[in-house]
């Protein structure tokens, strides 16, 4: 049973515009959330994280928003660049050793 | 390099054969994870090693799967009597922290194809 869901398998955005990737979770005990980015033939790389005590965390062009009541988080990329084209995974944990990953969203940024 | 290294990058095997997948974590990382990504699925947790503690094997899908970590460093994931449904990308990751509030460094994975 998927505890972390990314319902959009793909997203296309024009260069310079905002990309919004969404993630929903079912486990209210999750208290730490992460986004990873994956290029073809490479492993996922860490992008940004957020603890449940916050509702926003920003790092340059990347901002993650957490809505605990809706059990929803989103990743905003602005402005989007062609090099951002990749598969994005969200992940969550209860603060322990096990991380639960979504199925990923493939982002294409069109020049 | 200084990243997580996995070998082989690709493995094709016949149904019923045993396979061994290797992971070299980043030096000094005490935590090591194995995940599996089947086609169209997310990353499925398999097993977790933390220092000298007993591994968390709760994600291993069957007793055909086993893993060990020798000397707190290199890890080997073994799949016995492979089945076609074992075909997937197997990813290894390592991290420093003892708690979950950290992030993992992933290897490029081993793509296993069982014919």
Image (cartoon, rainbow, N blue to C red):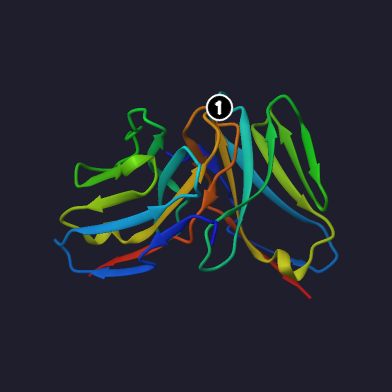
Looking at the image, which residue is at 32% across and 35% down? Answer: B57
Q: Is residue A4 above or below residue B85?
A: above
Looking at the image, which residue is at 45% across and 54% down? Answer: B41
Looking at the image, which residue is at 37% across and 30% down? Answer: B52
Q: Residues within 10 Å of mark 1 (few under 14, many from 20)?
A: some
Q: Is residue B100 above or below residue A40?
A: above
The residue pinned by badge 1 equals A95
In the picture as drawn, the residue positioned furthest to the bottom comes out as: A111
The picture places residue B109, in percent across and down from the top left corner, at 43, 60
Q: Is residue B85 left or right of residue A45?
A: left
Q: Is residue B62 left or right of residue A76?
A: left
Q: Quadrant of the C terminus of chain A?
A: bottom right
Q: Nearer the viewer, residue A8 or A31?
A: A31
Q: Nearer the viewer, residue A8 or B5?
A: B5
Quadrant position of residue A32: top right
Q: Nearer the viewer, residue A108 or A93?
A: A93
Q: Mark 1 belongs to which subunit?
A: A
The picture places residue A44, in percent across and down from the top left corner, at 56, 55
The picture places residue B94, in percent across and down from the top left corner, at 49, 45
The picture places residue A62, in percent across and down from the top left corner, at 78, 50
Count the numbered circles shown.
1
At mark 1, the secondary structure is: loop
Q: Quadrant of the N terminus of chain A?
A: top left
Quadrant position of residue A104: bottom right
Quadrant position of residue B67: top left
């Amino acid at each position: 049973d998927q505890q972390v869901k990314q319902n959009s398998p793909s997203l296309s955005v024009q260069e310079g515009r905002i990309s919004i990737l969404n993630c929903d979770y079912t486990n209210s005990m999750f208290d730490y959330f992460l986004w990873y980015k994956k290029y073809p033939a490479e492993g996922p790389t860490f992008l940004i994280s957020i603890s449940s005590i916050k509702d926003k965390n920003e790092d340059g062009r990347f901002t993650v928003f957490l809505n605990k009541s809706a059990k929803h988080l989103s990743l905003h990329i602005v402005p989007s660049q062609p090099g951002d084209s990749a598969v994005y995974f969200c992940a969550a944990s209860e603060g322990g050793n096990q991380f639960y990953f979504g199925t990923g969203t493939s982002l294409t940024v069109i020049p | 390099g200084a990243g997580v290294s996995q070998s082989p990058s690709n493995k094709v095997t016949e149904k019923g054969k045993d396979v061994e997948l290797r992971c070299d974590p980043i030096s000094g990382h005490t935590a090591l994870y194995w995940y599996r990504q089947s086609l169209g699925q997310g990353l499925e947790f398999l097993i977790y090693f933390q220092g000298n503690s007993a591994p968390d094997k709760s994600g291993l899908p069957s007793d055909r799967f086993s893993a060990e970590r020798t000397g707190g460093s290199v890890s080997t994931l073994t799949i016995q009597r492979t089945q076609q449904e074992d075909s997937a990308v197997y990813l290894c990751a390592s991290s420093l922290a003892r708690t979950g509030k950290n992030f993992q460094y992933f290897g490029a994975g081993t793509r296993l194809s069982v014919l």
